[in-house]
Image (spheres, rainbow, N blue to C red):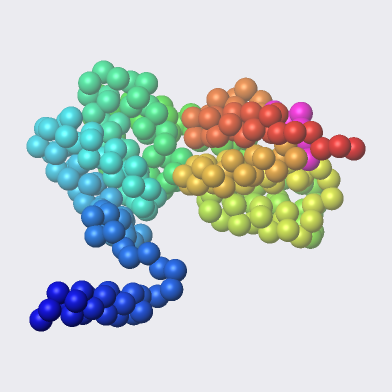
Amino acid sequence: MSSSNARAASLLALLGITACAPVGQQPADPSAPRVPQISESQLREKARESLAQGVEHYNAGRFADASRSLTAALDHGQLTRPEQGTARKYLAFMHCASGREAQCRDEFRKALEIDPGFELSVAEAGHPSWGPVYRDVRARLSATAAAAAPAKPAALRSGAEGVLDQGLARYAEGKFDAAAKLLASALKQGLAAKADQIAALKHAAFSHCLLGRKLTCRNEFAKIFAIEPAFDLPAAEAGHPSWAKVFADAKQRAQAAPKKKQ
């Protein structure tokens, strides 16, 4: 084949490839790394594997490895509430056994808040290192819940206000998912009093934060500032570790937002 024919053949081949390519589409870069697609079920399975590894490390006395695996399992955000309670239980055991009572107490509190059915076995509760801490945390939470429970109205309210009362009751019982749904329903139906609106939004935010839904929690706090810019939580509520940072962030964003013209 002559050089001119070779060049023509090369040109035709090139034109053929170009004609087959979609108009305006750039060819994929073969050197670009592929982003793995991980499903929610895979994340959940990975979280459960980390939980099982953490328990195995704990039983073998490898506490540093146990702490890493249990923390990783929680960080995945896919464990059920009882599974979260299990992870936090073993973290509490290790903190108490190492003399870190504050951290031990905090893990027991989180376990009880996220899973109201959480309970140590008789043998676990009788352990001298963490048994007294666990019983004290449980007693304090029970007392706080009883004190914070909304007073029962003399007469049952109807409409949106009645749904609000049901939502607050579920929250006091530790049924945070049910509480969030009822509170959202009350707001959707329309609460007349601003105080009721704030109560619904506040407890909805608390519920979402306790369930690990930080963004939704922050959005509920933001709605409060939209209707009451001067809103603030009392000291006992503002310092709660499940929502303290989220509330502070929502408050800062509300204060930094440009004021609407009247």
Q: Nearer the viewer, residue 258 or 206?
A: 258
Tell me residue 105's x, y (percent): 37, 27
Left or right? Give the position of 49 relative to 101: left
Give the extent of the magenta segment.
Answer: 227-232
Tell me residue 258's x, y (percent): 75, 33
Left or right? Give the position of 115 relative to 259: left
Q: Nearer the viewer, residue 155 or 26?
A: 26
Q: Quadrant of residue 237?
A: top right
Tell me residue 255's x, y (percent): 70, 29
Q: Is residue 41 above or below residue 140?
A: below
Q: Is residue 66 above or below residue 13?
A: above
Residue drawn 17% across the image and 31% down it: 63
Q: Quadrant of residue 166?
A: bottom right
Q: Nearer the viewer, residue 150 or 73?
A: 73
Residue 94 highlighted magenta (yes or no):
no
Q: Nearer the viewer, residue 8 or 109?
A: 8
Q: Does residue 166 appear anywhere in the picture?
A: no
Query: Is most of the magenta stretch helix, strand or loop?
Result: loop
Residue drawn 27% across the image and 80% down it: 12
Q: Is residue 157 above or below residue 96?
A: below
Q: Does residue 197 appear anywhere in the picture?
A: yes
Residue drawn 11% across the image and 32% down it: 61
Q: Quadrant of the C terminus?
A: top right
Furthest toward the right, the residue is 262
Left or right? Give the position of 106 relative to 228: left
Furthest toward the top, the residue is 99
Residue 229 highlighted magenta (yes or no):
yes
Tell me residue 141's x, y (percent): 49, 33
Q: Quadrant of the N terminus?
A: bottom left
